[in-house]
Image (spheres, helix red, strand yellow):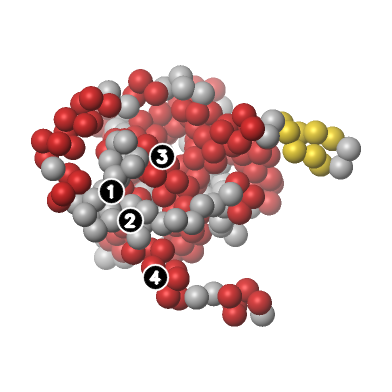
Amino acid sequence: MASYTQFNPTRLRSYILRLPLATRLLLLAIVGLWIATIPLPWLREFAQLEPAKMDLTQMHRLNLFPLMHLNFFHMIFNLVAIAPLLERFEAEFGTLVTLALFTGPFGTLPGGIYTLLEKFVFRANTVVMGASVWVFLLLSAEVMKQHKTNPNFSVGPYKVPTWTTPLILVLVTSILVPNVSFIGHLCGAGIGYLWASGYIKFLVPHEKILRWIETKANLLGRLPHYVSVDQKTYGRYGVLPTTSVPMGGIPRSPEPGAILGP
């Protein structure tokens, strides 16, 4: 009963209204795509990542598959899991960087690697969709930061490297939850490790370019909840939530593996 009495709709509404710009745009895109599939069910097939269909005319799937979900519960579980992680990422890197990465490389890289593995290594054609690829990507990036200050955690008499936490979650998810893609989740986690280690930071435009865009377009003055590239100033109506989410308290969906197979 305590969990129900502690639930405060006002605080939840306040949290949602204070989400930074890129985070709310990506969450709205997820919800909007799901709503669009109700009158237009063919959109799901159009956006899902199906390795056998991939060629140069199907590249849109690499960008859309993290936004598309199988059903309402699949979408809700992923929204709960991804929202605090996206918020933290945008607070650290800014709105422009977040939009550039999550509408581009953070979909195309794990999706592309997954497609190549399915087609040429495993000779399979498991269809995947869902934002859990981003959940594991962001979890991997977070635990790499935690690993620097807390390299290990104890499980009984054993010390387990902190950076392995997402891999353990991927394995547990694939065992406990039906119809999830173990390989798809690993691809997302792998890109998160590369990002946190600095190997793919070149994917982000130079800060001088981002600052020029911000200044030229007056983004801070025009866009509510916009987060500057210096992560210290925000759009005219926007204030980032002051709550922080420790690694042990990141909300996870009851169905944490949400890249679904057929």
Measure how far apart labels 3 and 4 are at the Cα level: 23 Å
**Residue drawn at (54%, 52%) of the image:** 245
- The residue that mark 1 highlights is 234
**Quick check: can you spot residue 237?**
yes
Label 3 sits on a secondary structure element that is helix
- The mark total stands at 4
Q: Earlier in the sequence, mark 1 or mark 3?
A: 3
Q: Which mark is residue 145?
A: none
Direction from residue 249 to residue 64 in the image, left or right: left
Residue beneath the point at 64% across and 32% down: 149
> What type is the residue that disc 4 sits on?
Arg
In the rendered view, tell whether residue 5 sits above or below residue 224: below
Amino acid carrying mark 1 in the image: Tyr
Asked whether disc 1 touches disc 2, contact meaning CB atoms under 8 Å apart, the reply is: yes
**Dot 1: element:** loop
Q: Is residue 209 left or right of residue 64?
A: left
Is the residue under label 2 in contact with that under label 4 (CB below 8 Å)? no
Figure quadrant of residue 24:
bottom left
What residue sits right under mark 3 in the picture?
Answer: 92
- Mark earlier in primary sequence (1, 4): 4
Residue 261 location, x and y as percent?
51, 46
The image quadrant that residue 1 belongs to is bottom right
Q: Residues within 10 Å of mark 3 (few under 14, many from 20)?
A: some
**Image height check: is 148 above or below 238?**
above
Q: Is residue 211 left or right of residue 94?
A: left
* Residue 239: mark in rendering: 2
User: Which residue lies under the disc numbered 4?
Assistant: 13
Binning the other alpha carbons within 10 Å of mark 2 as few (below 14), some (14 to 19) or many (20 upward) gives some
Q: Nearer the viewer, mark 3 or mark 4?
A: 3
Viewer-nearest residue: 89 or 31: 89
Apparent side of residue 210 relative to residue 247 in the rendered image (left or right): left
